[in-house]
Amino acid sequence: MKPSKYNVILSEGSKVLFFNALTRNYFRVSENKKDLVKNVLSNVDIYSNQIPQFCRSIKDQGFVVEDELDELEIISRKFQENIDKKAYKLVLLPTLECNFRCWYCVQDHDHISGCMNQDVQDRICRHIDFMITKKHIESLNIDWFGGEPFKYFNEVMIPISNYAKEICRKHNIPFISTTTTNGYLISPEIIDKAKDLNFKVFHITLDGDRNYHNNIRQAKGESSFDVILDNINNLCFSIANVEILMRVNYDDHNLNPIDIIEQIDGKILPENKSKIKIYFRKVWQISHFADEQNKLNEARNLLINKGYQSPSDLLLNFIPCYANKKYYNAISYNGKVFKCTAKADMKDDYLGRLTSNGNIVWNKTDFDISYYTPLFKNEKCGKCAYLPICMGPCNKNFEKNNLVVPEFSCKLKKISNFKDLIIAYCK
């Protein structure tokens, strides 16, 4: 037997963490046993009679594998299985308009107005019909994005959601609605209607503590911070089994975990905590800054102590990005089709368009083959122990390079706290 290629060893105070990135299994030993364990991993056949129980355990957990096992082939197979999975996620942008002007937002809300017209809505409904009857999708998740999608809840979100719900019911296909929103416009009236449209997940953002947030998201005569948290309480009360993903955006000035979490906790009702997952995410313009990781660790511990869930940032589904899935598309308000939504131009920088019969015509003729190229199949990724929880370069650069494999760029070099993410996952 041989040690797994994907064993990661990290120091953690007086302990040493052994983590296998392929199986996600882990164990800890004291610092003085680190070298012994490393020796056992490299010579498990020799030690199997001396410490049989430990050797069986590390074998069962994937820290040692059979000599002939190709672990990269396992990763490739899991990648392909997830790429091909027929759980269709359709991201729809009713508009690029927004009721706020957050300084860090990648989109331009000032020069594009209006919402998805009736023709585009009809094309989307025909597209949903096509994906169900011709592509035989096994489930449908419409994920509302923007701009701020709830600006056009009645005009766009309700009619399309009603159509999707009914056709999925007719074909016995599971259907849910999810959304990414700033949360300000979700009134009790909207919540009552959303409940009947199978809304299950609300991804809602805040910008630090009350004062910092309100300076960014200015609302006339009231605190947008408090309105959003009140709306979250209403969602938790009104929709059974709802899941709230609360993302707290931070920069190098507003990462004050105690103030932020105390203020959030002061608004959230105790009975709603189990429905809320809170995580902190740095805005893209800011580089790593002093004491950042210590503050993030502090935030994670505070959230756990307060009774909230804090989701892991580790990639656990063997694909580098949601955009890699074949059964994932994003359609903007004008009928243009995208993959990556983390981009400034969601109007003209598109990869395809939605036709009148509901099909997608891609700009590049071999798109269905070239876009799903496994970018992790290169020499550097092949040697990296972190591959199963990274899965290689980002497809955004692939898109920018006209779907020609670009010069290698390692994602992990841009994630300064990657090792801390592993340690947090193993808590």
Image (spheres, rainbow, N blue to C red):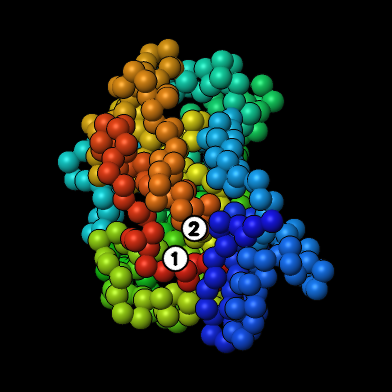
Badge number at residue 386 = 2
Badge number at residue 418 = 1
Vertical side of 107 occupied by 280: above or below: below
Q: Quadrant of residue 41?
A: bottom right
Q: Give the number of marks.
A: 2
Graded by Cα atoms within 10 Å as few (under 14), some (14 to 19) or many (20 or more), the crowding at tag 2 reads: many
Is 100 left or right of 182, judged from the image as shown?
left
Discs 2, 1 touching: Cβ within 8 Å: yes
Q: Dot 1 lies on which element? A: helix
- Name the outermost residue toward the front: 46
- Name the outermost residue toward the left: 111
Kind of residue sitting beneath label 2: Tyr
Graded by Cα atoms within 10 Å as few (under 14), some (14 to 19) or many (20 or more), the crowding at tag 1 reads: some
Badge number at residue 131 = none
The structure residue drawn at horizontal position 55% and vertical position 45%, both measured from the top left corner, is: 72
Give the percent coordinates (x, y) of residue 320. 46, 46
The structure residue drawn at horizontal position 49% and vertical position 58%, both measured from the top left corner, is: 386
Kind of residue sitting beneath label 1: Phe
